[in-house]
Amino acid sequence: MLTIIYKRKKCIGCNSCVLVCPLFFSMSKIDGKSVLLKSIKKKENYILKGIDNVFFNNLIKAKKICPVKIINIVKY
Amino acid sequence: MNKIELLSPIGNYESLYAAINAGADSIYFGVEQFNMRALNNNFLIKDIEKISKICSKYKIKKYLALNTIIYDHDILIIKRILKICKNYNIDGIIAMDNFIINYSNKLNLPIHISTQLNITNIESLKFYAKFSDVIVLSRELNLNQIKSICDQIKKDNILGFSKKQIKIEIFCHGSLCMAISGKCYLSLHTYNSSANRGACKQNCRRKYLVKDYKSNINFEINNEYIMSSKDLCTINFLDKIIKTGVKVLKIEGRGKSPEYVYITTKCYREAIDSIYNNTYSLNKINKWIYKLKTVYNRGFWSGYYLGQKIGEWNNTDGSSSIKKKIYIGYIKKYFNKKKVMIILIQSYNLKIGDNIYIIGNKIGVKIFKIKYLRNNKKENVSKIKQGELCSIKIPYKVYKNNKIYKIIENVNNNL
């Protein structure tokens, strides 16, 4: 299973993660930053747990393409 | 005659007070992800109110830079930011996107056309004058071209959006871009990190090797920093710039430190004042250039203003400043009546004769020379070591938790 950890505060709203992972990310029209869908906020981080391993390659693309490196994927 | 306006960059509250104390006429700042320094120090939307109040208190103008590329998902938040700017009397919006220009016009918020739009001729200026009050010319023009544009504005009486004559602004100091300002894709192509969304990774500032792929030959070049332009400095021909008829001089550097803001603003303030009271001299220029070299710089050149050929490249990684600051400690207590500060030395040491920066919110940057030191037993000493407390008398007000830095020679850059 996979967990996404997303440090939203530093997002610059470039839309790249939404382009490669529209299932998990979407742009907020309220503040122009990306939103990790269905995630829970813990302090500064947004966390989404229990993601199936089939999404691993796709999520790694989002992690790599993010210019400010705020998307982290943990496998367990 | 109205004096030329000096516009300073701020990226945090320390820089704001540094700019005020150094004599800036106005400041500009960015918020959230919508400015060309999105990766550096940054203010949030809630800071607009506070910055506006501080600037009003000190009677200086404040402008918000909203000069990135704007996408559909940014529209609502930009509208919100512009309404907040209107409520808190921000004096102008620095913009390049037509939606921001149009929406600010609706709100009656003055627009400054960003250098990102690269205005290089009078007809283009006439077009944008309908929507704006200040136009920042492209940094790639020379002084004759700038003068010609200013002369035509006077001759044809070209008016801006508020029906006053349009003002011309140019950059007077700070980093230059290797590309025509803003039109660079290096950072985007290599890191997907767009310079035009304020996320420039500054690839041009690094060392490169030029290699012919076919023959596998490395080219010999004198300077491996083949794309890193030196910094703009105009203090030695500022009189010529003022004569062109430019109305605003902008200093680059929202991503830079408070002492950079303080020293550059102070030097240009003194230079402008001396030109107006006829005391501008070579002697003073040399002193200012020395001071400017003590803070972050990549070596100086006159940019494109004097029509020199391109080829003024930097040859070091990072700053070429002749001085640097090292963290010493912070102010633990300040006695207002006695005007004495107690410093906790957390690293290195402090000696009589040392020059220090005191940096913090409310005071900005102060430069102070240590004339005497007292330890915690109230004995006069010549040196205080790490981990110890010391008390120093200081002629102006400072605050608890202000940080203390020692100014030392940047040895590597003096070789």
Image: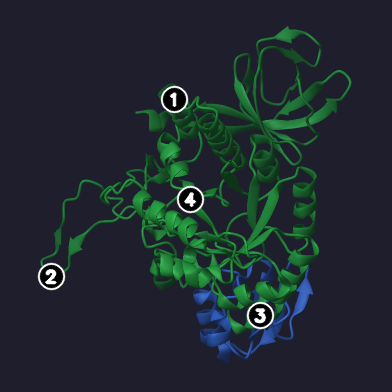
Chain colours: A blue, B green
Tell me the subunit letter for badge 2.
B
* Farthest residue, direction right: B337
Which one is earlier in the sequence, the residue at label 4 or at label 2? 4
Q: Are there few (<14), some (14-19), or many (20+) residues within 10 Å of tag 1?
A: few
Residue B61 versus residue B261 in the image, above or below: below
Secondary element under disc 4, as helix, strand or loop, is strand
The nearer-to-camera label among 1 and 3 is 1
> Of the residues shown, which amino acid type is indicated by label 4?
Phe
* Viewer-proximal residue among B36 and B383: B36
Which one is earlier in the sequence, the residue at label 2 or at label 1? 2
Which one is earlier in the sequence, the residue at label 1 or at label 3? 3
Q: Which mark is residue B214?
A: 2
* Farthest residue, direction left: B215
Judged left or right of residue B222, residue B390 is: right
Tell me the subunit letter for badge 3.
B
Circle 3 is placed at which residue position?
A: B75
